[in-house]
Amino acid sequence: MGLGLVAHLVRLGVLGSTSDHAPVVSINLFVALLCACIVLGHLLEENRWVNESITALIIGLCTGVVILLTTKGKSSHILVFSEDLFFIYLLPPIIFNAGFQVKKKKFFRNFMTITLFGAVGTMISFFTISLGAISIFSRMNIGTLDVGDFLAIGAIFSATDSVCTLQVLNQDETPLLYSLVFGEGVVNDATSVVLFNALQNFDLNQIDVAVVLKFLGNFCYLFLSSTFLGVFAGLLSAYIIKKLYIGRHSTDREVALMMLMAYLSYMLAELLDLSGILTVFFCGIVMSHYTWHNVTESSRVTTKHAFATLSFIAETSLFLYVGMDALDIEKWEFASDSPGKSICISSILLGLVLVGRAAFVFPLSFLSNLTKKTPLEKITWRQQVSN
């Protein structure tokens, strides 16, 4: 019924028009599709092969097909997501809730391994992908790309996606693998940001020891500053709530203060050119350990479910849009000019990403296992392959 309504509104020209009602109708349809994702996700909860993210992808794909057919190939979207919408509104609640709900004992017990994977591993993957791109793409006729462009490709593709990690892995079933992969995804965000900025600012033709030391200094500054800002915001919220005892008058103020302080830490990090992901993640960890124990009992229940709900809505919205964006006519028109070359380049990049990941997962897992005393703490072969 929802897809039929989409098709009917498109035929009427409501979605494609520039009238005042078009944004309202688009938002209504998108919210209706989100509700459909939740209902179908609940009905398919017992199915081990389908979860909310896959359900949202499928619904988004079907919606994109309907819009694409009814607009005669002009569009496949109900809404157009901008970069600001993703980084400012959707990403913060997802990462914060992951830090708020993470099993802290397991995370900090493996913190050295996480840092090893997130920093050293990302560097290994960066060099592997960059060298592979230089050796392969330089022989293909794909335009005028210099060494800096190939290194930028390596910096972008060397970082894993934290959002997808949350959907693929279950923290209760695989706590060690979850903490390692997600923790690495947070740390390598700082690494990739430093890498990309270094490539933009440094003269690649004059790389020497001073440049390398400057790069390492920038990474340490970004990592420590982002972490400190998140920890400071979390501790400040705990101090304010404890000293002022806000909950005696209103639990709403406690919940609102926690939300706003967490969001403020993320936006401050972005304003100061730090890693907002790293900041809001550690803010979530500190708030769950200190602030959460200083609020009233009702606020504890409210915050736990409120943060999880916001994260769930943001994740579902992202995967729903990704399903529709898979049929973006502009991207397909660009690829249709040379489909063979597009598929070839995508396949090569995918292969380089896999090779780059294998190049550090297995050696660094071996080194990490040497420091572990019990078999339960070691990263098994199966976990290394899943990683």
Image: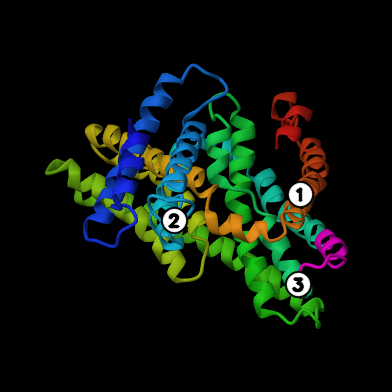
Callout 3 secondary element: loop
Magenta residues (range): 131-144
Disc nearer the start of the sequence (3/1): 3
Looking at the image, the residue that sits furthest to the left is: 249
Q: State whether residue 302 appears in this view.
A: yes
Q: Which residue is mark 3?
A: 143
Question: In the image, what residue occupies the spot 63% across and 47% down?
Answer: 184
| Lower sequence index among marks 2 and 3 | 2
Measure how far apart labels 2 and 3 are at the Cα level. 30 Å
Q: Is residue 132 magenta?
A: yes
Residue designated by label 2: 86
Under mark 1, the amino acid is: Ser
**Can you give x and y, in whole percent of width and height, for residue 336 in the image?**
66, 56
Is residue 289 visible in the rendered structure shown here?
Answer: no
Q: Amino acid at mark 2?
A: Phe
In this picture, residue 72 sits left or right of residue 221: left
Q: Quadrant of residue 307?
A: top left
Q: Which mark is residue 347?
A: 1
**Disc 2 to disc 1, C-alpha distance:** 27 Å
